[in-house]
Image: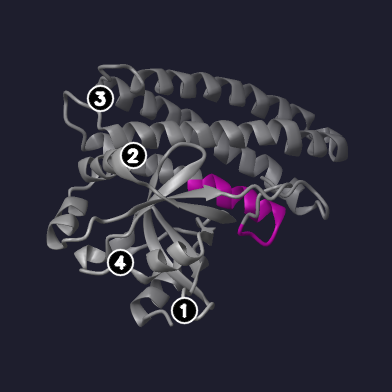
Amino acid sequence: MPNEFNQQVIDEFRANKGRMSGYFEGARMILLTTTGARTGTPHTTPVVYLPDGGERILVIASAGGAPTHPHWYRNLLAQPRATVESGAFTYEARAVVLEDEEREQAFARAVEAEPGWAAYQEKTERVIPVVALYEIAQGGPPNINAGSMGEAIKVVHDAFRRELAQIRKEMSGTGVSTLGAQLRVNCLTFCHGLHNHHTGEDLGMFPVLADRHPESAPALARLREEHERIAALVEDLRRVVTAEDADPAAARAEVERLTTELEAHLTYEEEQLVPLLDGLRNGPRGA
């Protein structure tokens, strides 16, 4: 059974769709549900994760530097399938333990971004494992943690807002001469997710709304134009952070430009589309 502290974290995470307060405010966190290696029963654990591109996220089995691996890691060794709750989404994932150079590179990125990981490794003789969680494609729209279409789009938008705010915070703490490897990955992962979100809207949600609500045509046209402008800003940010000698000041400037445009876009989209989406009984599930 989860301890009292973990249960409080789980309850707050679910109640607020991933938005945390106190010690975990701003942390990148998931709820990871594994199958007990001995009991066969599900166990849910709050776990901090690292973005790692569009196909997977990484979790580190540090257990605070304890001498033994955490239960969730041992569960994954026995049954490498888990349920991931990200706040906005819930999905099934396949777990792969990173080995050799791939593990070393991933852990080095983590330490560069947060030296506390190195402190945990120094406390224990075991090599702290790094696990990749790959989403298992189920077909159909994503499972958004919302009770209505209107709530779904706000939940997804808030997840983008939180991640962008975290990247801005990380950018403000970056040294003047280098852009950390993990921060580059964070930026690129955000760009990938935003591209997929807008593509899904353009191809899925917008056509349905145009068909059922012809009066929304001007708003949808504006939103599509904003998607194009945001795509150009995303490409500018991607170009800057992937440069061999990435300039932190240039990256911060691109993040600020993207933030200004995206915030205005998300607000306008919510104002225009939430009432329409809440009126759809059988609309597109993937906001």
Q: Indicate the amino acid at tag 3.
A: Pro
Graded by Cα atoms within 10 Å as few (under 14), some (14 to 19) or many (20 or more), the crowding at tag 4 reads: some
Q: Indicate the amino acid at tag 4.
A: His
Q: Indicate the amino acid at tag 1.
A: Arg
Whole-percent x and y of residue 190? Answer: 46, 36
Quadrant housing the N terminus: bottom left
Mark 3 or 2 closer to N-term? 2
Mark 1 or 2 closer to N-term? 1
Element assignment for label 1: loop
Element assignment for label 3: helix
106 relative position to 220: left or right: left
Element assignment for label 4: loop
Whole-percent x and y of residue 121? Answer: 18, 56
Indicate yes or no whether the magenta region holds residue 157.
yes
- Return the residue at label 3: 248
Mark 3 or 4: the one toward you: 4
- Residue occupying image coordinates x 53% and y 61%: 82
- Return the residue at label 2: 102
Give, as a single range, the part of the protein colored magenta: 145-159
Mark 3–mark 2 Cα distance, whole angstroms, equals: 26 Å
Mark 1 or 3: the one toward you: 1
- Residue occupying image coordinates x 40% and y 18%: 239
- Return the residue at label 1: 38
